[in-house]
Image (spheres, helix red, strand yellow):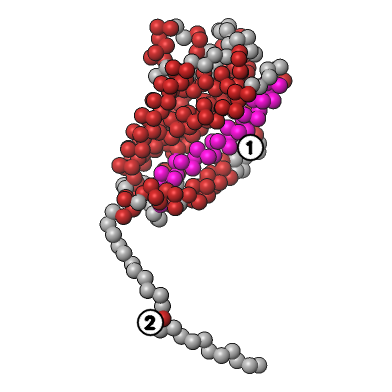
Amino acid sequence: MTASPPQPRHSESDLPPFDLIIEGGRHERHYWTDLWRYRELLFFLAWRDLLVRYKQTVLGVAWSVIRPLATMAAFTFVFSRVARLPSEADVPYAVLVYAAMLPWTLFAGAFQDSSNSVVGSAHIVAKVYFPRLLIPASTLLVNLADFLIALGVLLVLMLLLGVAPSWRLLLLPLLVLPALLGALGLGLMLGALNVRYRDVRVLIPFITQFGLYLSPVGYSSAVVPEMWRGVYALNPLVGVIDACRWAILGARATGHWPDFVLACAVVAALLTLGLWVFRRSERQFADVI
């Protein structure tokens, strides 16, 4: 057996030169650049949450279909059969409710998940550096996956009830965007507070449940008296839901576009405030969590 020749040893002079720079505040100045550099982590976190969401459940992904369908059935019975509220443009009441459930479920799921995301990822927040904003942002991708599944169910429901989809359905991604960004804005604010004050996690389901009845999910916004319309439209979900119904139901529904413009303005304010609160609190997450 022939022994292999010994490998040459490199001296320090043969190694390529490099500089190690320790600079205070570097991460703060390059924060938004780091968001792009760590973009793969965003998708990894979303994939992790998507796998964990229905892990060890009997029905699995079917829950993303069962929950909106069950809510739709309950609202249709209560508001249509018991309260006898009118539908919009004579469409089946079930389709009217489910068309509103799409943006509402997307908003509620993204809001709750983003609000609890930082506390739920405490094991990595306290160990390594990365822009913490990626954690709540990744929850939006998870809820978008559920949204696409629920959208497919809506199309099947419309065909079964004889409601033909409109070309306006192609505009739906743009119309639900304010709901997604509004959920992120609120989630950033409450998520930052949740790290320091764990009472916030008790408040989150209450806000979600309260908002469900303040939004035109189980009924048409046309039943709201005109004198209260301006105050009612301060809820950004009002304009978003009406716009989504316009896209889904086609010519049978009328969108209230001033309400949608107001919704976009409110969402922009919420997102700006949420980013400001989150960034001010982010430096202390590892110490407090």
Q: Is residue 148 magenta?
A: yes
Position of 59 with respect to 266 (left or right) is right
Front-most of residues 212 and 176: 176
Q: Position of residue 89 (x, y in %)?
A: 60, 10
Q: Does the rendering let one see residue 251? A: yes
Cβ–Cβ below 8 Å for labels 1 and 2? no
Crowd band around label 2 with a 10 angstrom C-alpha radius: few (<14), some (14–19), many (20+): few
Residue occupying image coordinates x 52% and y 47%: 43
Q: Is residue 4 magenta?
A: no
Q: Secondary structure at mark 1?
A: helix
Numbered tag placed on residue 80 in the rendering: none
Of marks 1 and 2, the one in the foreground: 2
- Secondary structure character of the magenta stretch overall: helix
Q: Does the rendering let one see residue 80? A: no
Front-most of residues 71 and 283: 283
Front-most of residues 142 and 199: 142
Question: In the rendered structure, which amino acid carries the disc numbered 2?
Answer: Ser
Numbered tag placed on residue 61 in the rendering: 1
Task: Name the outermost residue toward the left.
Answer: 24
Front-most of residues 147 and 269: 269
Q: Which residue is mark 2?
A: 13
Question: In the rendered structure, which amino acid carries the disc numbered 1?
Answer: Val
Residue occupying image coordinates x 53% and y 40%: 141
User: Considering only vertical position in the picture, is 155 above or below 16?
Assistant: above
Q: Quadrant of the N terminus?
A: bottom right
Magenta part of the chain: 130-159
Q: Position of residue 137 (x, y in %)?
A: 46, 41
Residue occupying image coordinates x 50% and y 8%: 223
Residue occupying image coordinates x 43% and y 7%: 226
Q: Secondary structure at mark 2?
A: helix
Task: Name the outermost residue toward the bottom.
Answer: 2
Q: Position of residue 183 (x, y in %)?
A: 45, 31
